[in-house]
Amino acid sequence: MKTLRAETATRTFWHTLTALACGAAMLMALPAAAQGDYPSRPIKMIVPFGAGTSTDTVARILADAMGKSLKQPIIVENKAGGGGSIGTDFSARAPADGYTLVMGTVGTHAINKTMYRKLPYDPIRDFAPLGLIGQTPTLLVVSADSPLKSLKDLKAAAAKPPGVSFASAGNGTSGHLAGELLKSKLGGEMVHIPYKEGGMAMSDVMSGQAHFMFYHPAAVMPHIKAGKMRALGSSGAQRSSAAPDVPTINEQVPGGGFDLVAWFMLYAPSGTPTPVLEKLRNTVNAVLASPEIASKLAAQGVEKSTVKPADLGSFSLREISKWAELVKRSGAQVD
């Protein structure tokens, strides 16, 4: 009797163990199956700046094209503030399932690393790069009514008390640091005025509340064409394709040394499953290879990048190092 009971108990034990093992295997298989069906619902793309900004414009072009390719809508959601750190941190903390992406910039994923003493996210550790969308020099713009017609005029105005002021989309943005670099080149007094987002900064430049700002062609070109703004220079080594008649600052400043280019890169939270990352990366690359999308981006002043997808990690590290030097030189810091 004891032997029969022991055999029964043993069979029951192994049956239970087998059932548990099968159940565990099924549970483990669920994420893989879900990944195979990805995406099965709408995707959210976070823009860490306001609506109507260059980052927002670029994001919407990409979101529309990617959504058609993936057969699921990609909804752009703006979360502005903190030089892009608020929306970027939100994205870093989102579930790593491929349903929350973020349109990062040179500000959020390079400059902020050094600019902010207590940055709530790490641009390398917390994100997986999906594709470098493109790069663009920024344009130095003033109000169309401004008496400043050239960099020579700007230098003269900065040399006279109380100097001049320049606006930006926030502390640590490329526009902020471009202004600091220009100050080091021209001298004089140039006071930085940070705004919550670029639209507010542009409004105050157009109204004369601030003397100038550096901003992306995508945002300022409509105002230039409408006769509300005037461009005095371009921040890159080469002229902007969106404004080929605007000379570079290097062409106007003795000694040159002014080459600052902003960029846009799409990211997913770190830890996103590899199959999902691969699908997203393939989609981004296919979209960027489309002549139609390339044309739309070029119309916004966003030029195709020569950085290979395999080199995105090393590119990011180089950019952090490059901008860190400029941040330290400027003395700018945000608590």
Image: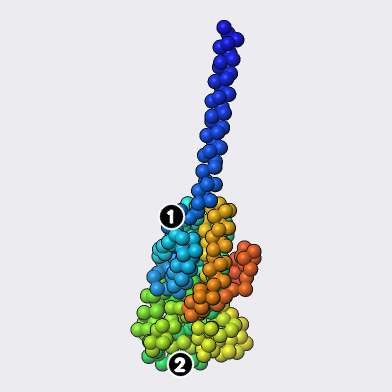
Most extreme residue toward the top, as rendered? 1
Residue 226 lies, in percent from the top left, at 38, 87
Identify whether 313 is placed above or below 160: above
Residue sitting at x 44%, y 65%: 47
Residue 31 lies, in percent from the top left, at 52, 46
Q: Amino acid at mark 1?
A: Arg
Question: Where residue 281 is drawn, which disc sits there?
Answer: none
> Looking at this view, is 129 or 292 the one in front?
292
Residue 279 lies, in percent from the top left, at 55, 58
> Looking at this view, is 216 or 26 the one in front?
26
Residue sitting at x 48%, y 92%: 150
> Looking at this view, is 95 or 171 the one in front?
95
Residue 154 lies, in percent from the top left, at 47, 89
Question: Where residue 149 is drawn, which disc sits there?
Answer: 2
Secondary structure, mark 2, is loop
Q: Residues within 10 Å of mark 1 (few under 14, many from 20)?
A: few
Secondary structure, mark 1, is loop
Residue sitting at x 37%, y 75%: 200
Name the image quarter holding residue 286. bottom right
- The residues tagged by marks 1 and 2 sit, at their Cα atoms, a distance apart of 52 Å
Q: Residues within 10 Å of mark 2 (few under 14, many from 20)?
A: some
Regarding residue 27, the answer to whether it shows in the image is yes
Q: Amino acid at mark 2?
A: Lys
Label located before the other in sequence (1 or 2): 1
Question: Where residue 41 is drawn, which disc sits there?
Answer: 1
Regarding residue 330, the answer to whether it shows in the image is no
